[in-house]
Image (cartoon, rainbow, N blue to C red):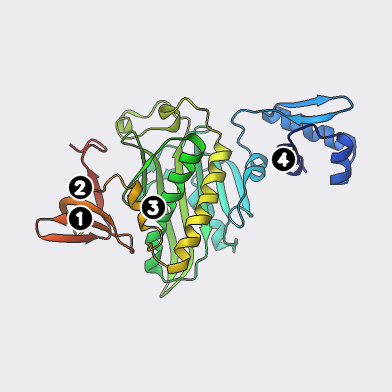
Amino acid sequence: MKEKILKILKDTRDYVSGQELCEHLGVSRTAVWKVIRQLQEDGYAIEAVRNRGYCLRESGDVFTREELAATLSTDWVGRNLVFLDLVDSTNNKARHLAEQGAPEGTLVVAVEQSAGKGRRGRSWVSAGGDGVWMSLLLRPDFMPECASMLTLVAALAVEEAIRQVTGLKSRIKWPNDVILNEKKVCGILTEMSTEMESIHYVIIGIGINVGIREFPEEIRNVATSLALCTEKSVKRAELAAAVAKAWEHYYGRFLQTMDLSLLMEAYNERLINRDRQVKVTGSAAGCTGIARGINKKGELLVETEEGLKAVMSGEVSVRGIYGYV
């Protein structure tokens, strides 16, 4: 009921009478009043005026299950929403739920992670109240080799969501880091369970630094947050909902061709690597050259002295990014 009342208040610009809420939900005035008090305690600015009812005013960064559920405007992502105050890793939780049979579109969101994960076994700073930590469960019907492209799809979704919510124009560092002021503001980790030529499930983990203002010394020169890049107050629920909505759009286009044919142009427009000198390491295709964008498989095309190389994986350094000069 708490979620339903919040959504009604959000969808109504004016006052909503207590009687109207009672009739709509089939509960007593006392029950409605108790929920209103709970919402006020959560941080919502709700005015209660005799003979007029209740009105939701602009509130701060309230990040609860009810707030996120009321903000989501997706068709299938987050219809099964798991919201946690604390978890070791949203990817771990999503994997556990997947093994138990959770449906596609299950969205796991946490206020804080105690053991956030990055690519290649790295840790991820996930302080409480300072970011959007979320994982999406997919059960796709395509070959496992297609799954690597999903990280690029997720990067597009995050870039668009950041732009919509903050007005900031972020960029993408291939394959899936989202960059602001030439520092990393978001990381994406894709994990999956496969068997022979089929996929049991894929988990897309997304971590966006929102309110962090002080990073550990070892990553201070390579990491940033939305709070450090804009004076605009960013609501985590709004940002998470925007990512979910953008994901549905870009993933839908991906499914039309099972590759990035319909997304290459948008991705390359946002690619910070493009037409810049890059150094590829940690891969059999290690090389140095000028990045020319991606192909429909999501591979990075690097123009080297030996010719154009298609890089499928590896660590890619871009001059001026992450201290590479």
Say which label, 3 or 1, has the lower sequence index.
3
Are circles 2 and 1 on residues that touch, CB within 8 Å? yes
Dot 3: within a 10 Å radius of its alpha carbon, few (fewer than 14), some, or many (20 or more) residues?
few
Are circles 4 and 2 on residues that touch, CB within 8 Å? no
Asked if 219 appears above or below 279 in the picture, the reply is above
Tell which residue pokes out farthest to the left in this image. 305
Q: Is residue 276 left or right of residue 47?
A: left
Q: CA distance from mark 3 to mark 4?
A: 32 Å
Q: Quadrant of residue 224?
A: top left
In the rendered image, which residue does mark 3 sit on?
266
SS at badge 3 = helix
In the rendered image, which residue does mark 2 sit on?
278
Q: CA distance from mark 3 to mark 2?
A: 20 Å
Say which label, 4 or 2, has the lower sequence index.
4
Amino acid under disc 2:
Val
Dot 1: within a 10 Å radius of its alpha carbon, few (fewer than 14), some, or many (20 or more) residues?
many
SS at badge 1 = strand
Which of the two marks, 4 or 2, is nearer to us in this view? Answer: 4
Quadrant assignment for the C terminus: top left
Residue 216 visible to the viewer = yes
Say which label, 3 or 4, has the lower sequence index.
4
Q: Residue 11, labelled with which disc?
A: 4
In the rendered image, which residue does mark 1 sit on?
302
Amino acid under disc 4:
Asp
Tell which residue pokes out farthest to the bottom in this image. 196
